[in-house]
Structure formats: C-alpha cells, structure tokens
Image: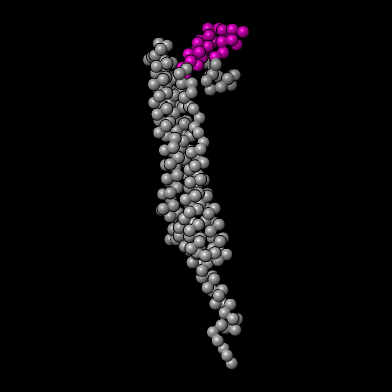
Amino acid sequence: MGGGGGGGDGGAAAREAARKSRIDSSVRSINALFLDPTTGQMVDSRKQALDDVESKVQQRFLPEFQKDTVNAQRELKFAIARRGLSGGSAQSDASSRLRDRVAETERDISQRALVARNEAERGQQSLLDNLIAQAQSDTDQSILLNQASSGQNAAINRAVDSAKAQALPNAFQDVGTLFKDIVERRNFNQGVRTGLSGSGFQNATPSNLFGSGSSNSGVETAS
C-alpha cells in the first residue's frame, strides 16, 4: 500500500536533516570569518584589523605629543638659561625629570592603544557568539554573513573612537619651572645639613611639583 518516500512522517525527518545541514553550514561559514578552521587561531585579516586599532590610537596621540615634547625641551632650555643654571646639576636633574615625563606619557599612549585593541577583540568575540546563537536558530546565512562583516568593523570603530575621545593629560604644563623645585630642595637640604631646625625648618620646606606635604618629599639627611 502506498509507501512514498516520506518514511511515513510526512517528510519531517528530511526537513530536520536539511535544517541541521543549514545550521552546520552557517556555523562553519561564520567561524571561518573569525578563526582559521585548521589551526583554530585568529584569521590573518582579523589579526591585521586589530593591529590597526593599536596603530590608529597611537597615531592619534603620538605626533602631537612628539611636537609638544620638542617644545617642552626648548622651553626648559630657555628657562634654565635665563636663570644662569645652564650646564649645572639643576639642568641635569630637570632634564631627567622631563625624560621621565616623556617616558610616562609614551607608556600611557601604548597602554591606551592596547586597551583599545583588547576592547575591539572583545567586541568581535561578542559578535561571534551572537552570530553562532542566531545560526543555531536557523537564521538565514546571508543575513548572518552581512552582520559579521559590518559587526566586525563596528567593533573596531567603537574601540578606536572611544580611545581617541580621551585626551592626554598635559605632561608639560609646568615645564618652565621644572627646575625650581630642584633648586629649592637643594637649598632646603643644605639647610638641614647645616643645622636648620625649629620653625625655620618648617618654613623652608619647598614646594613639590609632584605633590605637597612631607610624604615622598625627597629630603636628604646627613649620614
């Protein structure tokens, strides 16, 4: 009696097999945009895009900061020369402090670039997880692939824009008087060594460009 090809289930098994095949195809296609199917590592195009995030953030800050550094070096040189301190230990100490500030800001820029890269990578991973979930719900593959392309770019742009929106602190705001604290401290320490005490000691405490009060004041004591 009538045995057609539906296996008695009205074709339900065939439809389920086709659904699973579509899902498997979508999952493989989506994963291939993010991960190498052979190694399981990030595909080169994605890795390059994330590397570009770091480069874009660094290029947002570095050129301007390098110009500011040159101007700060010139300003410090002139300020010291005007006070007749060229060639002395005050100039050496001030230049050392300036180099420390440059190095600190360069580290800050590098850290911002790395944070942006990590943020972009997390955004892409979240996108991948979402796309796989949609694929397993049998969403049309062409829709998912379009979302994958636009979504990866969006994750990168969000991370870059977020990093660029954060201004760098002004590392050279007081560079014209960077040596002033050094001179004051040297005079103060000389007073300590020659027996300055009592209220005179308190009144002679120098201002500190990097803070105030007694903590980390750099006071030298005679050995």
Nearer-the-camera pick, 118 or 57: 57
> Which residue is depicted at the point 49% across and 56% down?
148
Judged from this view, the residue extending furthest toward the left is 87
**Magenta highlight range:** 178-206
Q: Picture quarter containing residue 67?
A: top left
Judged from this view, the residue extending furthest toward the bottom is 1
Q: Is residue 205 above or below residue 108?
A: above
> Which residue is depicted at the point 48% across and 15% down?
180
Q: Is residue 90 above or below residue 112?
A: above
Magenta-span inclusion, residue 189? yes
Residue 101 in view of the camera: yes
> Which residue is depicted at the point 56% across and 73% down?
16
Q: Is residue 99 above or below residue 47?
A: above
Work out which quarter of the rendered image holds the N terminus and state it. Answer: bottom right
> Which residue is depicted at the point 52% across and 50% down?
123
Q: Is residue 78 above or below residue 166?
A: above
SS majority, magenta: helix
Q: How many marks?
A: 0
Residue 143 pos. (x, y %): 50, 61
Q: Which coloring applies here?
A: one colour
Magenta-span inclusion, residue 194? yes
Residue 40 in view of the camera: no
Residue 27 pos. (x, y %): 50, 63
Nearer-the-camera pick, 36 or 136: 136
Residue 150 pos. (x, y %): 48, 54
